[in-house]
């Protein structure tokens, strides 16, 4: 059974930082892209960031570019999302996803494993 478990969410003031982690078990994702998505209340799931199998390629949503950094440690089967300069509009449930392919993608259809999500709440 494949599991992706996110951690690191919580309550933070605007302008603050959080670091999300996602550790996979049951299979290795070292040859697959990984991604972070989020879903705010009343909205659909949206792309946040993705990283290629080697870590050499990354893509970010325009809304987080320059503030968030995605990285991975294949030896630990873990992907991270460093979130700085958080804004109120970053409040959402953040989901980690394991990709079907080795290349980056912002399309949810290109991911076949999902974590349960971790809540990030940014307060004023």
Image (cartoon, rainbow, N blue to C red):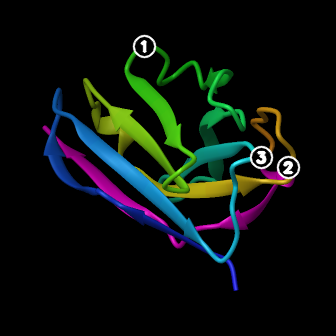
The tag on residue 81 is none
Quarter of the figure that contains the C terminus: top left
Tell me whether the residue at label 2 lies in contact with that at label 3, contact meaning CB atoms closer than 8 angstroms: no
Locate residue 95 relative to residue 112 in the image: left or right: left
Mark 1, mark 3: which one is toward the viewer?
A: 3
- Label 3 Cα crowd, 10 Å radius (few <14 / some 14-19 / many 20+): some
Q: Which residue is mark 2?
A: 110
Which residue is painted at 28% across and 27% down in the image? 84
Q: Secondary structure at mark 2?
A: helix
Locate residue 36 relative to residue 30 in the image: left or right: left
Q: Position of residue 79 (x, y in %)?
A: 51, 47
The tag on residue 31 is 3
Give the mark, 1 or 2, whose residue is nearer the N terminus: 1
Single out the residue that lies furthest toward the bottom: 1
Q: Position of residue 60 (x, y in %)?
A: 59, 24
The tag on residue 66 is 1
Q: Secondary structure at mark 3?
A: loop
Q: Secondary structure at mark 1?
A: loop
Quarter of the figure that contains the N terminus: bottom right
Single out the residue that lies furthest toward the front: 75
> How many numbered marks have been drawn onto this rendered protein structure?
3
Q: Is residue 46 magenta?
A: no
Give the mark, 2 or 3, whose residue is nearer the N terminus: 3
Locate residue 69 relative to residue 28 in the image: left or right: left
- For this rendering, which residue is in front, 50 or 65? 50
What is the magenta range? 108-124
Q: Position of residue 61 (x, y in %)?
A: 60, 25
Gap in angstroms between the C-alphas marked 2 and 3: 14 Å
């Amino acid at each position: 059974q494949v599991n992706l478990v996110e951690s690191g969410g919580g309550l933070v003031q605007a302008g603050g930082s959080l670091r999300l982690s996602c550790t996979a078990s049951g299979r290795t994702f070292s040859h697959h892209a990984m991604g972070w998505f989020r879903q705010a209340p009343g909205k659909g799931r949206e792309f946040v960031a993705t990283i290629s199998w080697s870590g050499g390629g990354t893509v970010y949503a325009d809304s987080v570019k320059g503030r968030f950094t995605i990285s991975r440690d294949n030896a630990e089967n873990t992907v991270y999302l460093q979130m700085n300069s958080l804004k109120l509009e970053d409040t959402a449930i953040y989901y980690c996803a394991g990709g079907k392919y080795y290349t980056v993608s912002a399309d949810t259809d290109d991911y076949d494993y999902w974590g349960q999500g971790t809540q990030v709440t940014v307060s004023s």
